[in-house]
Image (spheres, rainbow, N blue to C red):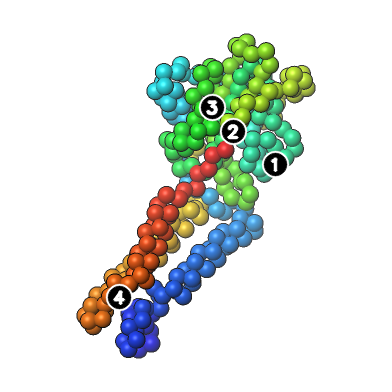
Amino acid sequence: MAWQNWFLPHKDTHKKAHLISWEGMIIYILLFILLQVSFSIVNYTMPGVLGISANLDQKRLIELTNIERQKKGLPSVSENSALDQAAVLKAQNMFQENYWAHFAPSGKSPWDFIIGSGYKFTFAGENLAKNFYNSDDVVVAWMNSPTHRDNLLNSKYKDIGIAVVEGVLNGQKTTLIVQMFGTNEMLAAQPSIEVQGKQIAVPEQAFSNTPELVGALGETKLSANVLIGPYIDPYYVSKVIGFSVIVLITVLLIVDIWVLKRRGVFRLSSHNIAHMALLSLAAGSLFMAGPGAIL
C-alpha cells in the first residue's frame, strides 16, 4: 500500500521511506522555519504570551560572583543598595525603550543610571544577561566570555549591585539580569566604566548633569527571587519538536536497515553516513541550544 512508502523502503525500488528521504528532510526544515515564524507572529500579536519559566536569585548571583573572584585570589565585592537601584533602573529602562544593549536608543548610558542612583564612582562596570533558567548558568555564561569574565574579575571593584527584573521585551516575556560593579575610592584622575571589554572615560559633566533617578523606581521593589511562569516556552517547544523528529528519523533509519537486510539488498552508502552525520549535528545543536544571552 502507498502509505507504507512513508515509513518503509519501497518494495520494488528499495528507495528509502518518504519520511527519511532528502525531500522529507527539506520538509522538516521548512516546518521548523514555519514554527519560528509562528513564534514571531505570536510575539507581535499577543505580547507576553511566550516566555520562559526562570528561577533566579539575586543573592545567589552575588554569591557566585564572589566565589569566582575568590578562586582568583581577589577580594569579594559587597552588595551596595545604590548599585542595586542603578541595576533596577537600567533593567526598567530596557523594557520601557524596548532595547537590549548597554546604551539606550534615547542616549542613556550605563553611568547615567549609576550616577542617577546617587553612587559616585571612579571605576565601574556593567554585565547584562537575559532569559536564563537559573542563577548558576548566568555566571557560567559570563565566565565563559573573556570580556565579561575580565569585568567580573576586575580587582578594582569594591561594590556590586544586581537586579533581576521581568517584563516584555520585543513581544516576549523576558527576565533581565543587570550586574553593576563600582568603587568610590579615588583610584583614577578621570572616572571610567568597563562595557563589553572596553574602558570608557565618563565625561566630567555627567556627574553634574545627570538627575537623581531613584524616584523613578516608584513602587518597584528589589526581589531576591524571581519565579516566572508558566508561559509558553518557545525554546522548550522547539527542543521537544526537534528531538521528536530526530527520534522518528532514527527509528525509521533503523527500520530501513533491518528491512533491507532481510531483503538481502542492504549496503552502507554515503547516504546512510550523511543521514547519521546530519542527525548527530542536529541533536548536538538542540542539546547545546538555550534561551540565555549575555551582553
**Does label 3 or label 1 sit earlier along the sequence?**
1
Disc 3 from disc 2: Cα separation: 8 Å
Q: Which residue is mark 2?
A: 196
Q: Which residue is found at the position 48% from the left and 42% from the top? A: 132
Q: Secondary structure at mark 3?
A: helix
Q: Which residue is found at the position 29% from the left and 72% from the top? A: 268
* Residue 240 vs residue 229, the one in the foreground: 240
Give the percent coordinates (x, y) of residue 125. Answer: 59, 26
Q: Which residue is found at the position 68% from the left and 23% from the top? A: 201
**Does label 4 or label 3 sit earlier along the sequence?**
3
Q: Which residue is mark 1?
A: 97
Q: Secondary structure at mark 2?
A: loop
Q: Amino acid at mark 1?
A: Glu
Disc 4 from disc 3: Cα separation: 54 Å
Dot 3, crowdedness within 10 Å: few (<14), some or many (≥20)? many
User: In this picture, is 59 found above or below 251?
Assistant: above
**Does label 2 or label 1 sit earlier along the sequence?**
1
Q: Which residue is mark 4?
A: 256
Residue extending farthest to the front is 270
**Does label 4 or label 2 sit earlier along the sequence?**
2
| Marks 2 & 1, CB-CB < 8 Å contact | no
Q: Amino acid at mark 4?
A: Asp
Disc 3 from disc 1: Cα separation: 26 Å
Dot 4, crowdedness within 10 Å: few (<14), some or many (≥20)? many
Q: Which residue is found at the position 61% from the left and 55% from the top? A: 43
